[in-house]
Image (spheres, helix red, strand yellow):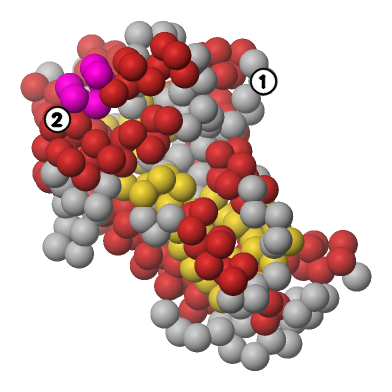
Amino acid sequence: MPAPASIAAYDTPSAADTAVVLVNLGTPDAPDTASVRRYLAEFLHDRRVVDMSRWLWCPLLHFAILPLRSGKVAHKYASVWLPEGSPLAVHTRRLAEAVQRELPQVRVLHAMRYGKPSWKQLLLDLERQGVRRVLALPLYPQYSTSTTASVGDVLDAVPGLSSRMVREYHLDPDWVAAVADSVRRHRAIHGMGEHLLMSFHGLPQRFAAAGDPYPRHCEASAQAIAQALGLPDDAWTLSYQSRFGRERWLEPSTTDTLTALAERGLRRVDVIAPGFAVDCLETLEEVAIMLAEEFAARGGELRYIPCLNDSPAHAAALAGVIERELDEWAEVAA
């Protein structure tokens, strides 16, 4: 990663004392049972993710869920693991490097909320290095208390730093344009699909009932992308994937939606995942492999369009979000 250049802008206070950190969810260190178990234990211990009583949840987690699921999840990771490592880790690092090239005047880093490089440890390291300000950009376009707010919890726990966090960018015009352009490029190469499915990560329904804006943000993102593509209402559908547990989650589910599309006689469906900044287990294994196989069994072809990853358009869009946040921060400090 290139070293930060001398600062001309954002000098109230000096951007030489500023770090911008792209924060993603996280990933195991390796596609094996032990690594996956450590990762899931950290992830599922977060009260933002699972808000059950610790007296009930911890025994269930450690004596049932982790022993039963870790090996199965490790097998899923192994099916998509890259030579350089976990897809999420590889693409997140590359994206941070691409954003750094867009913003040579500030220091751009990356971290994981769970796993390595640790978000909490990075903040402590930056504080020891004399960094005074940290701008966090959670790589979740749509805000949720279960994801974005958890990044903020860690940021707030390091009081020695002046900090700011980008809450969401679900309607950022450059980001919307980048997603729409990725669909256009795919269809220009592979031909037009009969339908576009926009699959977002799921969330328990009670979170939304309690006021979490996530489903509203997903709906707004999907509408903006469809509008940018000029799609009529019957040419696209929003759905939610990655359900966990027995409680009710946001609907419609991606699995049920694909079943319904197959029953309508649709045989070529394109799918994007606008809630994911970079490709990961949920996009590559769940959608591009598992759901594609299920749709193929019904006589259809599910064509996955990759996330924006470290594309120039994605890096430029995030750089624009960062610049606006730094400008606003400088105005407040002035």
The circle drawn on residue 72 is 2
Q: Is residue 37 above or below residue 127?
A: above
Checking the image for residue 211, the label placed there is 1
Can residue 44 be seen here? The reply is yes
Task: Answer above or below: position of 204 versus 246.
Answer: below
Residue at the spot x=44%, y=72% of the render? 98
Horizontal and vertical percent position of residue 154:
58, 47
Q: Are marks 2 and 1 in contact (CB under 8 Å)?
A: no
Q: Position of residue 267 (x, y in %)?
A: 19, 27
Looking at the figure, which quarter contains the N terminus?
A: bottom left
Please state which of residues 253 and 160 is positioned toward the viewer in this rendering: 160
Let me know if residue 66 is in the magenta part.
yes
- Side of 28 relative to 212 (left or right): left
Name the kind of residue labelled 2 in the image: Lys
Q: Confirm whether residue 232 shows in the render.
A: no
Question: Residue extending furthest right?
Answer: 334
- Of badges 2 and 1, the one in the foreground is 2
Quadrant where the image shows the C terminus: bottom right
Q: What element does badge 2 sit on?
A: helix
Mark 2 to mark 1: distance in Å? Answer: 34 Å
Q: Is 91 above or below relative to 27? A: below
Provide the residue span drawn in magenta: 63-68
Which residue in the rendered view is the most extreme toward the bottom? 6
Left or right: where does residue 159 sit relative to residue 329? Answer: left
Which one is earlier in the sequence, the residue at label 2 or at label 1?
A: 2
